[in-house]
Amino acid sequence: MDKLDDIFAKQRQLDDFLISERGLDFDTQVWVQKGVLAMISELAELLDEVNFKWWKNPTPVNEDRVKDEMVDILHFFVSMCNKIGMDSQELYERYLAKNEVNFRRQHGTGDKPGYELPAGPNKNVQP
């Protein structure tokens, strides 16, 4: 099984379990709202791991905890994808399309101005 397919399937199993065992019954809009809030919470936890508080003495970054927070964010992201009916194949296809758009913008050939790289030695970024 494809790794991304497996992640989506395992998240669906976890979500189905939580819905059943905790008696959760929300419409799609509320699921997305809750997912966004959960991701914001996890993003804040990730920020705490990488010393974003310039007014505080930094501590050594624990890369393992950083990675765990990234996985937590992925859990909620994939859960939201599942809730809106976007499977791993659609996510992949949409990612590829947006990635192409982002490269075109950087090369100054996209649909929105203001993204193009300045002329200079690093102008050779390739898609």
Image (spheres, rainbow, N blue to C red):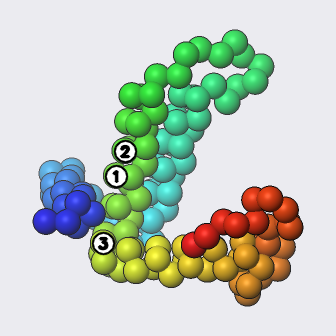
Q: Which residue is mark 2?
A: 71
Q: Quadrant of the N terminus?
A: bottom left
The x, y position of residue 20, in whole percent, is 15, 58
- The nearer-to-camera label among 1 and 3 is 3
Q: Quadrant of residue 92?
A: bottom left
Q: Is residue 26 left or right of residue 116?
A: left
Distance Cα–Cα, label 1 vs label 3: 13 Å
| Mark linked to residue 75 | 1
Q: Is residue 106 left or right of residue 27?
A: right
Q: Which residue is mark 3?
A: 88
Label 1 vs 3, first from the N-terminus: 1
Q: Decide: marks 2, 1 in contact (CB < 8 A)? A: yes
- The nearer-to-camera label among 2 and 1 is 2
Judge whether residue 51 can be spotted in this image: yes
Badge 2 marks a residue whose secondary structure is helix
Distance Cα–Cα, label 2 vs label 1: 6 Å
Q: Residue 108 or 23: which is nearer the viewer?
A: 108
Give the residue type at disc 3: Ser
The x, y position of residue 10, in whole percent, is 18, 57
